[in-house]
Amino acid sequence: MSYLKPLFSHPKLPKNKLGYTLKEYEGSLSTLCAGCGHDSISAAIVRACFELSIEPHLVAKISGIGCSSKTPTYFLGNSHGFNSVHGRMPSVATGANMANRDLVYFGVSGDGDSASIGMGQFVHVIRRNLNMVYVVMNNGCYGLTKGQDSATADQGSKNKSGSINPFQAIDLASMAIELGASFVAQSFSGDKQQLIPLLKAAIKHPGFAFLNVISPCVTFNNNPGSTKSYDYVREHIDATSAKDLVPGKNEIKIKYEAGMSTQVEMHDGSEIQLNKLALDWDPEDRNSAVNALQKARAKDEILTGLLYANTDWNDLHRTLKTTKTPLNQLKENELCPGIKVLNQVNASFR
Amino acid sequence: MSYLKPLFSHPKLPKNKLGYTLKEYEGSLSTLCAGCGHDSISAAIVRACFELSIEPHLVAKISGIGCSSKTPTYFLGNSHGFNSVHGRMPSVATGANMANRDLVYFGVSGDGDSASIGMGQFVHVIRRNLNMVYVVMNNGCYGLTKGQDSATADQGSKNKSGSINPFQAIDLASMAIELGASFVAQSFSGDKQQLIPLLKAAIKHPGFAFLNVISPCVTFNNNPGSTKSYDYVREHIDATSAKDLVPGKNEIKIKYEAGMSTQVEMHDGSEIQLNKLALDWDPEDRNSAVNALQKARAKDEILTGLLYANTDWNDLHRTLKTTKTPLNQLKENELCPGIKVLNQVNASFR
Amino acid sequence: MNNRINDFIVRFANVNGTGSASANFLFAKTVFRMGIPVTPKNIFPSNIQGLPTWYEVRVSEKGYLGRREGIDLLVCVNPQSMAKDVLSVNEGGYFIFDSTKKLNPEYRREGIHYLGIPMMEMANAAFDDPRKRQLLKNIIYVGALAKLLAMDESIIRQLIEEQFEGKKSLIEANFKALSLGIDYVEKHYEYPLSFKLEKRELLGEKILVDGNTACGLGAVYGGATVMAWYPITPSTSVAEAYENFCKQFRKTEGGENNFAIVQAEDELAAMGMVIGANWNGARAFTATSGPGVSLMSEFLGLAYFAEVPAVLIDVQRAGPSTGMPTRTQQSDLLAAAFASHGDTKHILLLPATPKECFEMTAESFDLAEQLQTPVILLTDLDLGMNDHVSEPFEWDVKRKYKRGKVLTAEELEGIGKFGRYLDSDGDGIPYRTYPGTHPTKGAFFTRGTSKDEYAAYTEDGAAYKRNMDRLTRKWETVKKLVPKAEISISSKPEAIGLLFFGTSTFSSEEAKDLLNEEGIAVDSIRIRAFPFGKEVVDFVESHATIFVVEQNRDAQMRKMLIMEMDCLPKKLVPVLNYDGMPITADAICQQIVQYLNPKRLSNHELSKTAV
Amino acid sequence: MNNRINDFIVRFANVNGTGSASANFLFAKTVFRMGIPVTPKNIFPSNIQGLPTWYEVRVSEKGYLGRREGIDLLVCVNPQSMAKDVLSVNEGGYFIFDSTKKLNPEYRREGIHYLGIPMMEMANAAFDDPRKRQLLKNIIYVGALAKLLAMDESIIRQLIEEQFEGKKSLIEANFKALSLGIDYVEKHYEYPLSFKLEKRELLGEKILVDGNTACGLGAVYGGATVMAWYPITPSTSVAEAYENFCKQFRKTEGGENNFAIVQAEDELAAMGMVIGANWNGARAFTATSGPGVSLMSEFLGLAYFAEVPAVLIDVQRAGPSTGMPTRTQQSDLLAAAFASHGDTKHILLLPATPKECFEMTAESFDLAEQLQTPVILLTDLDLGMNDHVSEPFEWDVKRKYKRGKVLTAEELEGIGKFGRYLDSDGDGIPYRTYPGTHPTKGAFFTRGTSKDEYAAYTEDGAAYKRNMDRLTRKWETVKKLVPKAEISISSKPEAIGLLFFGTSTFSSEEAKDLLNEEGIAVDSIRIRAFPFGKEVVDFVESHATIFVVEQNRDAQMRKMLIMEMDCLPKKLVPVLNYDGMPITADAICQQIVQYLNPKRLSNHELSKTAV
Ligand SMILES: Cc1ncc(C[n+]2csc(CCOP(=O)(O)OP(=O)(O)O)c2C)c(N)n1
Ligand SMILES: Cc1ncc(C[n+]2csc(CCOP(=O)(O)OP(=O)(O)O)c2C)c(N)n1
Ligand code: SF4
Ligand code: SF4
Ligand SMILES: [Mg+2]
Ligand SMILES: [Mg+2]
């Protein structure tokens, strides 16, 4: 069910260069769980586009399937959106981008969508350096299908049904760097001070910009942790195995400085350790990005910030040497070689 | 078309511990192009199994689709083989392994099969640490469909149809280490001194053993290089665009010492640089493996040898705590809980 | 509205994610324990929290277990959907709401009764913990219903005790909430209502269970040791049930697992694992829904052509594409039967009850192994996720798994050259061997390419054709082995034929009664498998008009019937429902009566879709 | 064997990977240039080098372009296949072999003529470079044939000059080899043979080209700008042709590309890209074969339900599964028409000639965009990879692309609320907009889930049903827009019906003549699209018996006909060929005559499969 929000034009709302207020960048009312990290990311996208004064209708939003993949409905209501099939957003985005190089492409995906069923397409869209912003709203679980572990779930973490995840987590950011992604950043849904500038940088990056955003799932967060505060609800769920109970919680917001590290308490009382790259971090050094990620992993830390960026590599249009005019705007006379050529072709087959 | 070779028992052939000669480890006559690197790898597999005195019928050979994936027909004729569908060998191998933990599993794949259509399954079989030997016969192209670039083709290399590959190559070994593969090795098809011991180590490894073997395609090798020696044939192909012409060439064989580097001339006169890991290389240090691969890449070198091995990690059966008896050998009374239990179950639903 | 005993419909309107499911189930289960046929349907959105969700309970003394339109009592605790909910109540029906806040006058309408109960207020007063309040509010309305509908309160209490066994504080809290509801009605309203419950013993040994649980159990009994799956609504609970039962019944004494469950990275991989495991001699299966079937189609073709057993449970939902993931349909027939390119076809099994889910899942392994080919069980969201009154599960103690034609090492010794794809028995089914059976005999190469009788790769057209013709012969054998259709003949020569399958069964059976009441004689046939056996051909041939009831738009079963037999297509009349809600008897009658007598206006009204 | 002019079959037996294709094509092309109808078929293995490969050339004065059994002359330069090849020659036919080595006496048989030519010996003596020798050996036998069959040598020379334009040394070497063959025959054998060639002017403006090239060209003319594909035999050359033509005809003045071709990582991705590009307003397509269609099935369902245009060229090969990748079949009809779960169905176009490949590919973009749904062109290996004599490609200079209902910014300004899925025109086809069209109007959300008329997500059963019913209405519109069947009526009331499509056409047309000769009157219909138009229904209704000719085992076209219409299935009689070789007129006649008169033994022999 989707509700259209009334678009009041509040006269006092600040306007951007195009004369738009934030309202023009919003979407329909979210139907995600109250407090879901994904909604914070949507809000950051709204803000980033507003601040960059991007024409909303010159954005295309493409997603797969999942709670995360639903979010394009909840931001940029004046943009066309495409909620495609599970794990295949990259290919749809690739086709769309080939058809019109002049739009801004937002690809939104989840960790299930990208790291499991979509792994192949994830790898190959990176390899092609498609000019797009690729956001994974990473909650380590399959939200929409009720909390199974995803391939990014931490090894040893406990999921909703109580079993311990025995598999190594796939580190999408590290993989992206290994695969030669030209822009790789990592952040936390609740850290809008960091997320908004990263999104802006990603939009401006002339190539594939990957953003792995840790985004806690209120309902099926799968970190082992204190269950103290939720006794009653947990017991009830255990006893009834009714999976339709979502304990309402608030969005997690954080704020910390570059070069610092912070502990974030998740909805279930467990904690994760975020480590923000220092201001003098050199994002153009691929080797040190790889090493820093490996070190952070060893310390169970999540490194946040712009890990790596390279603007020298050709995006797919430059690689394919496509014309500057968007292909979907070519005229019939530019497309159809005409009758004279056809006669020549015929002659060549006689 | 597949020919069965006559199985002479030559009385003077050396025998292994089981009393088998090499003949017992061979397969049908190969239908690959004369000189194809894949055949050398098949021969190395035959040799490795012979030397380890593995019971041939206790091996299962599983592959995808491609010239490389055809090879299981050409080795271990007494083993069951399964030539499945393109890119999906890992899942078939996973199922097979779950059914019977007591066999040795050979998965054979190509670079097209694993790095393109099969990328998702490649990643996830690694993540599960399935106990198997996974060999990629890597020729940087799609042999069976006539020479298109694969995702492991070197950036800047020229393919049969003359176009230059503009994309970064996927480095499967490096990816495997990044993803936490428990055994990662690299070699060259013609280097049997190195390949056979690596295959033996892979077979013995109690978990996922990945072997990326550079295996030149005689017919569609895609390295830029001297075309001098093939003038007439090339001109002919250019003029007629007849793609059915395969210039017969010999298998490339090499031999060089650990810690050394060697240049190998490919079929078309181009060269690749192989660098064999020194004897004192510590294969248990993941970070240095990553770094060494990165450095080699920067120098356009291919590092060969056992890059990384870790025997502490649980293979999938240990992770899933399956019983020691192969599941396909459980008796009916172990499988069916029987009528008494069923009555209890019924009662629980009243 | 006349006084009706055990014949009415209650609907609950909740917000999803608020834990209403256990309270609502408590209500339905109490009716069940009172010995009265009951059919609950959960109508939920494809999201996790905050959207309207409904739970509809039909109580039917006559034992009609299909859905019916028309709500007699609506318990509405969701302001979001209240406007629509009010309109959905039958004339003369009851509307129960949380009167903590005053009811918006817009929601007042003529002709129905409003019963306000200050649920939130009472919960707030009685319980400190806010999370408790939300949950127990739901129990308060169960208490109210207990009084209004004359439920057996001791059964409710007993069910609470069973559910929260050993958790005293939970039990007490629930009891307290229950009493709040009961007391409130006692004080403020007349009770019972004009329709109500009365204890019966109509259910005998029957159980109340959902189809997915039954499938999971069937797989355990059927001897499946390997399951590979990928989460997708509404099939996920098949995997969950299988896992739960395995953990209970499939441990070795040392606590090891006599099973292996792999959550695959996608459906392609899940089916690949199933094929690999079956090839290697383990019974293996997967469960998915429509999108997964589409993705598995290449692998299904491989299993057909390479002749590897495989079991797939497709819990259908409303398509096409992602469709309505939380609504029901029977619309994957064509996709499943003809999954994959080339001349491929697959066996379908069509269970109608949880008991059949159990039995057919178990049987599917026998069939897959005997026939060396995929078997697809087509159930659906309605059968899979809703609780159904069902005959209890049965298991013949003398039953042995039929593992099909598998040669042992000894047998291999005894024969000459082993021909994997030789039709030695004339039934089209060749012999196979498991990997590792014999050191020098019986190894063969499995492939999706053409091969000769000895499993050698060949591009010889004659050998290819021989193999394809053998597969056709095997298909004839299939027809003899799959479950037979269930036929009921009225002995009236002018009887129309009614053909149905799966979850269209309950409503079709009810429709038969309704039609009989109107003087229309009906012979019926319930299809239980594809390909169709001779009994189906005979039924179709012996009836002038056959109404084919199914829950999809394109009359897929009808298409499959006419393409498989030589009958005149015109005599197969489609009776369809495809709005995602389970089909009703009324809808079936309506369409049949309309067809038989287009001018006469039936006294059954056109079904309105409910949500 | 009587003296036959321009009516015989020559077969070449080579080893693949030895460059025989260009020599063999030279032979066929010379016949073509002599103005005589010619049909070459390349019969190649699914590997790269070292296995037997055949090239069969039928020469037919009467213009029969289908395959025929029976080889009059066999040129065998492959010892591997010689034993079989010798047996395949007609009684009285000729067997040409390389007599450098003595012929194994086992290969001698009565009743055929052996013509030894020491090809390798001559090549070795004449050329130094060993690679040259191998290639030019093939030209030697072309020279021999020139003499034996009275070919126009100047045409052969001209063709060599054209092919190696500017490469003098190549031309000279080829000429030299040619003369070696000519001279050898002059010296050693009587010539011409009892059957031979004679110049004609039977071909007019016709061209000799393969269907995949024609599809590639059609996509350029049809305005496709985006192609995404994954290599698979026999469809790869569609992509190659499209790329080649684009490079010639689709560059800007600055040398930039007015097209984008992406080699995808697999078929799922290829179809995803096609859908993404079409959604964004570019004409985009992909080409694949059976396994790719299976893999694309989820995406095809999305395109159907989300109503995004998409063009897919399926060059069919022998299935199921990997099947026989280098053999032909028409066996993806059901898989393509009903690809994906749920109530999904797709438009199929069925070209029969290269000209139709060109036209229908171009038209498929119009149809896909007008109807906002996938269009699947079903061609096959025979049509796609073999050269065919075809009418020349035509293009109406006044033709404009039909881009369908796409709203511009101005049009959006003019209308009220934009309803993406509103059926404003009653034809079931709604209006769409491209992303980026208008700042505040026209944006909508595309999805595979259910939606209302305004593209808003909904789980409302009524809205879902309205949408599904609109799609049914659209399907009715489809029937009016797709290419009509081609019908030919004999005006004899007792005429039987002959129904065929695609590459069964040539042989069916020939079969008509053969049947007429036997006194059997035939009306015929060539199906060109699914769903079927009214003309198909009328044809079927007006004939008592219709033979449905197709190249698959399961009579898939017949199935589709009977499930779409109300006719009696019995009257549709399957005529099938599914051994992977193109169907022959003899095989068709044989089956029809057998059916019409089961006891009479036809004078057409049962087709033997050739390889
Ligand atoms: C082909 C297919 N398989 C399975 C599903 C069911 N499904 C829907 S969402 C989802 C997982 C989503 O996980 P993720 O991408 O992490 O998103 P989240 O909900 O956690 O944001 C799955 C498996 C589907 N829609 N399609
Ligand atoms: C689904 C599917 N797509 C495409 C093909 C066609 N195909 C056969 S082999 C192959 C590529 C093989 O390349 P690789 O794995 O590198 O093997 P190689 O031949 O180079 O050893 C392809 C694309 C197929 N068989 N199945
Ligand atoms: S289930 Fe988790 S991911 Fe989905 S909306 Fe709720 S909180 Fe967010
Ligand atoms: S084409 Fe290349 S990979 Fe294939 S068999 Fe020949 S040499 Fe080997
Ligand atoms: Mg997730
Ligand atoms: Mg390769």
Image: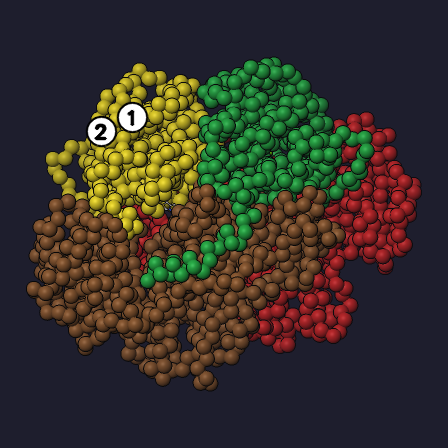
Chain colours: A yellow, B green, C brown, D red
Q: Residue at x 27, y 72 (%)?
A: C200
| C489 left or right of C178 in image | right
Label 2 belongs to which residue?
A254
**Which residue extends farthest front?**
C253
Report the disc number at residue A274.
1
Tell me which numbered mark, 1 or 2, is placed earlier along the sequence.
2
Instruction: State yes or no: discs 1 and 2 in contact (Cβ < 8 Å).
Output: yes
**Ligand 3 under 8 Å from disc 2 Cβ:** no
Q: Residue at x 57, y 67 (%)?
A: C480
User: How far from the left and from the top, in percent, is residue C13?
Assistant: 21, 58
Q: Residues within 10 Å of mark 1 (few under 14, many from 20)?
A: many
Where ligand 3 lies, by quadrant?
top left
Chain that bears disc 2: A
Would residue A16 be visible to someone looking at this image?
yes
Q: Residue at x 28, y 78 (%)?
A: C603
Q: Identity of the amino acid at label 2?
A: Ile
Query: Label 2's element?
Result: loop
Quarter of the rendering containing residue B203: top right
| B231 left or right of A19 in image | right
Question: What quarter of the picture does the N terminus of chain B occupy?
Answer: top right
Chain that bears disc 1: A
**Ligand 5 under 8 Å from disc 1 Cβ:** no
User: How far from the left and from the top, in percent, is residue C342?
Assistant: 58, 54
Above or below — where is B41 with respect to D556?
above
Above or below — where is A137 with respect to D580?
above
Q: Residue at x 44, y 82 (%)?
A: C490
Q: Identity of the amino acid at label 1?
A: Leu
